[in-house]
Amino acid sequence: MKVNLAAQILSGTVANALEHFYDESVSETVCFIRHFNRFFDCLNVRSLFEGRNKRNPDLDPYTDVNDNRLEWLTTTFLGYFEEWRQNIENRNIAATAKQKAAMTLSRQTLDGLKISVKSITECVKFMLGAGAEFILAHHFNQDPLEQHFGHYRHKQ
């Protein structure tokens, strides 16, 4: 999968361009993009100095269990999708459950986001609480696991 293409589309640059060239009709799209852009930044902390160098505090290493990004991920980011789901559910329109489900992200995608956010935030809190000086969230990924099973698939 080409994650970098999704990151380019769901970026602050695209959100800024949409706001600049279009009217309020794209405001919800811009909101969606900004949420995912920050989500990507919070989970892609790669070095001790990237946040400072890029002037983006979301790219700073995690050093405190009370980091506001951890709170943002679990409440604001996940809450955004829950509010979206509730708004669709409460809409007073003649639509089947399947049609309403098509108006939001799939259940599997939402479950994956919840699992990812809750797992990473709890791991960061646990590791910092256990004495780690800092956490680089970029290292929380499944690439080594995928590579391991890729070797098994290749041998068949």
Image: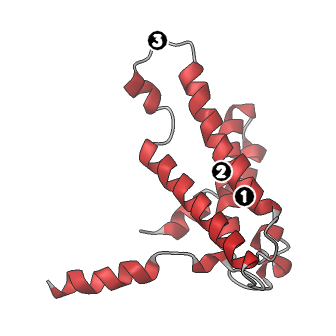
Q: Which of marks 1 and 3 is nearer the N terminus?
A: 1
Q: Position of residue 132 (x, y in %)?
A: 74, 84
113 in relation to 120, above or below:
above
According to the picture, the residue beneath numbered tag 1 turns out to be 12
Number of other residues with Cα within 10 Å of mark 3, as a class: few under 14, some 14 to 19, many 20 or more: few
Disc assigned to residue 94:
3
- The residues bearing labels 2 and 1 have C-alpha atoms spaced at a distance of 7 Å
Residue displayed at 54% across by 23% down: 89
Residue displayed at 66% across by 64% down: 121
29 in relation to 120, above or below:
above
Q: Where is residue 69 in the image (x, y as percent from the top left)?
A: 77, 61
Q: What element carries label 2?
A: helix
- The residues bearing labels 1 and 3 have C-alpha atoms spaced at a distance of 35 Å
User: Which is closer to the viewer, label 1 or label 3?
Assistant: 3
Q: Earlier in the sequence, mark 2 or mark 3?
A: 2
Q: Left or right? Give the position of 134 relative to 2.
A: right
Q: Position of residue 43 (x, y in %)?
A: 65, 68
According to the picture, the residue beneath numbered tag 2 turns out to be 33
Number of other residues with Cα within 10 Å of mark 1, as a class: few under 14, some 14 to 19, many 20 or more: some
Q: What residue type is labelled 2?
A: Ile
Q: Which of marks 2 and 1 is nearer the N terminus?
A: 1
